[in-house]
Image (cartoon, helix red, strand yellow):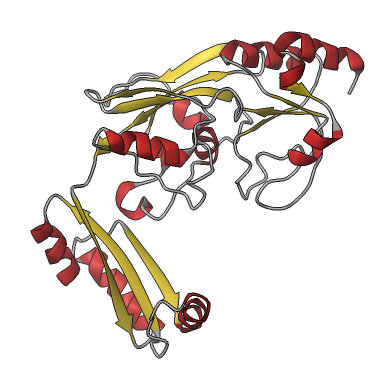
Amino acid sequence: MDSKHIKYFENLIGKDNAKFDKAHQIAYCYDATKKRYEPDGVLFPRDENDVSAILKYCNENNIIIVPRGAGSGFTGGALASSGGVVLSFEKHMNKILEIDMQNMVAVVQPGVINMDLQKAALEVGLFYPPDPASENYSSIGGNVSENAGGMRAAKYGITKDYVMALRAVLPNGEIIRAGKRTIKDVAGYNIAGILIASEGSLAVITEITLKLIAKPKFKKTAMGVFPSVNSAMNAVYKTMAAGVTPVAMEFLDSLSIKAVEQKFNKGLPTDAGAILISDVDGPNLDVIDGDLAI
């Protein structure tokens, strides 16, 4: 990268937040796909104004920008496959700004870790359902940019179902707000919906307003043992057709059961054709027991 660009970024956000050394190029060159593309540098914006200035400068100087959360995705959205600079939110823009209990919303910066938000919501009796497999380290900004799902998706939906509003920066540096923090928002274009799952290709998300729901009062887990894969799949169909929507259903075939039992010795029935492990939640134990009985 041209030294004049490096000097601009260092003057804008400080040398501690503008890194062009080999170590940072290697550290930010891969994601969960394990493919490797070294960026020219890594920038750590301190706030939305930094993001705006960076995008404006890069747009004027034809420098590629790659927004990056935790780098846990499998789609390559965080990879600098054509060079340019990685824009990372993990260092500064990683705060839960607000949890509004009355309106049941959370306002977060893109670098907030999914599990940290879940825990903060649970502490005040609220619940943020989207739970991607990477929930312990993936960022909310990355979840929104990839429209992440998770085990609870069947009952509670995926990330897009909880995004109420976004703040974002367009490629020319203009700051926009899309959506509202109200449940009913029917006027105008659904700009927030367009930005969800766009992987940073349309704008850089700088703030996210998320819907929270009441924390489920009770939860139970049950395991069903079946002689074959087909009988287990029929049980899934019959469960859903009966009007019961489990929080999650995990399926293991006979090979998976034996592999898990060999590795962890959990007491699983190794002679089973398949097993289904189901999580069910509800307002009281009678409802949960009724769902499990079905």
Please say if 163 is above or below 32: above
| Residue at the limit of the structure toward the bottom, as seen here | 271
Count of picture labels: 0
**Can residue 97 be spotted in the picture?**
yes
Which residue occupies 48% across, 75% down? Answer: 264
* Image quarter of the N terminus: top right
**Can residue 82 be spotted in the picture?**
no
Q: Quadrant of residue 65?
A: top right
Q: Give percent across and percent down for residue 50.
A: 64, 13
Relative to 82, is 117 on the left or the right? left
Which residue occupies 53% across, 37% down? Answer: 139
* Image quarter of the C terminus: bottom left
Please say if 224 is above or below 163: below
Q: Give percent across and percent down for residue 189.
A: 43, 22
Which residue occupies 61% across, 18% down? Answer: 170
Relative to 192, is 243 on the left or the right? left
Relative to 237, is 52 on the left or the right? right
Please say if 231 is above or below 241: below
Asked whether 234 or 117 is in front, the reply is: 117
| Residue at the limit of the structure toward the left, as seen here | 286
Q: Give percent across and percent down for residue 292.
A: 19, 68
Q: Quadrant of residue 22?
A: top right
Relative to 166, is 53 on the left or the right? right
Asked whether 283 or 294 is in front, the reply is: 283
Asked whether 217 or 161 is in front, the reply is: 217
Which residue occupies 80% across, 20% down? Answer: 62
Q: Quadrant of residue 11?
A: top right
| Residue at the limit of the structure toward the front, as seen here | 265
| Residue at the limit of the structure toward the right, as seen here | 2
